Image (cartoon, helix red, strand yellow):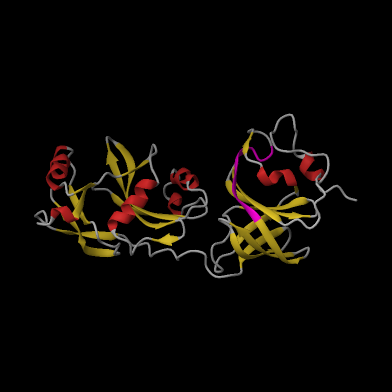
Amino acid sequence: MADKLERYRSKRDPARTPEPVPDAPSPTPGGNAFVVQEHHARSLHWDLRLERDGVLVSWAVPKGLPADPGTNHLAVHTEDHPMEYLTFHGEIPQGEYGGGTMTVWDTGTYDVEKWADREVKFVLHGKRASGRFVLFQTRGKNWMIHRMDGAARDPFPPLEPMLPTRRTKIPKDASAYAFEFAWGGRRLLVPIDGGRTDASREHPWLRGLAESFGSRTAVLDGELATLGGAELLVFYDLLYDDGHSLTARPYTERRAALEALNLTGARWQTAPAWPGEAEPVRQAAREQGLPGVVAKRLDSPYEPGPSKSWLLLPP
């Protein structure tokens, strides 16, 4: 019988990597476990592994499992892995094959609907990964993965920013608003999906931010501002989070979800906001030479285009 782990062992030195390197496959015929591992290696990807005849048949999926049937994702068929890899997590040393951090993203069981040399249909039963999928081979050695059931997430919202209306006086019901600095920068909406963002084409340094999200989807609203002579991206709204659109939610809910992300980095941060504190924020804006203050109604949804729920006030 062919040794299904020969290729796996040939790429690993058990004296240099904490990965399991067994002598032979584990004889568990009929097993139906799966694992998806998040792998921060040379490039972020997810490893899908399905138990089959005592080994974990594996595919590397650069953008993770597709969330809806409208988008197929690349899946690179890799070597079979040992069953011990179902629970493996840790740091593979740099310089070794697959060097980087690996965590278990989800695990569970799966049902096989079809298993052929060029096509595998299956149903995942996990906490985060669930639904019907098909892996199919295209030309050459390339594989793709397709979701066969309904969308697992809301569609992304239109990437059009909400804009404030100019006003000279503080609203009388100031307690119904949160007050933020007007930064005087350039508006930037940042969509994040599969640990990547299209915004990195113009701003390559955003790749680190996108990768830090892992498989979490998001659309962030912010502004490129110059503070202390350095360019900084300040985020002040969250339109989409982890598969759910937040545009219909009130500002207070979106703001709480944004702050929960704890976005703090060398090139980005979460903008501060002060509910009901109109005059102190205006005074601080004057002292810092900022162009004004934005008053945002606490109960306002996110409305692309000009809105009277956001007011741009002079400092």
Is 286 part of what is drawn in magenta? Answer: no
Bounds of the magenta segment: 97-108
Above or below — where is 29 with respect to 155?
above
- Residue at 55% in and 70% down: 150
Label total for image: 0
- Residue at 77% in and 50% down: 55
Is 102 part of what is drawn in magenta? Answer: yes
- Residue at 70% in and 44% down: 85
Instruction: Name the foreground residue: 6 vs 29.
Output: 29
Whether residue 138 is visible to the viewer of this picture, yes or no, is no
Instruction: Residue 161: name its quadrant.
Output: bottom left
Side of 97 where 208 appears, left or right: left
Instruction: Name the foreground residue: 58 vs 205.
Output: 58
Side of 182 where 57 appears, left or right: right
Residue 47 % position (x, y): 64, 50
Q: Residue furthest right?
A: 1
Would you say the magenta stretch is mainly helix, strand or loop? strand
- Residue at 19% in and 43% down: 290
Whether residue 205 is visible to the viewer of this picture, yes or no, is yes
Residue 33 % position (x, y): 70, 54
Instruction: Name the foreground residue: 100 vs 106.
Output: 106
Residue 113 % position (x, y): 72, 68
Instruction: Name the foreground residue: 106 vs 73.
Output: 106
Residue 4 % position (x, y): 82, 49
Above or below — where is 62 with respect to 147?
above
Side of 10 where 253 appears, left or right: left
Q: Residue furthest top?
A: 15
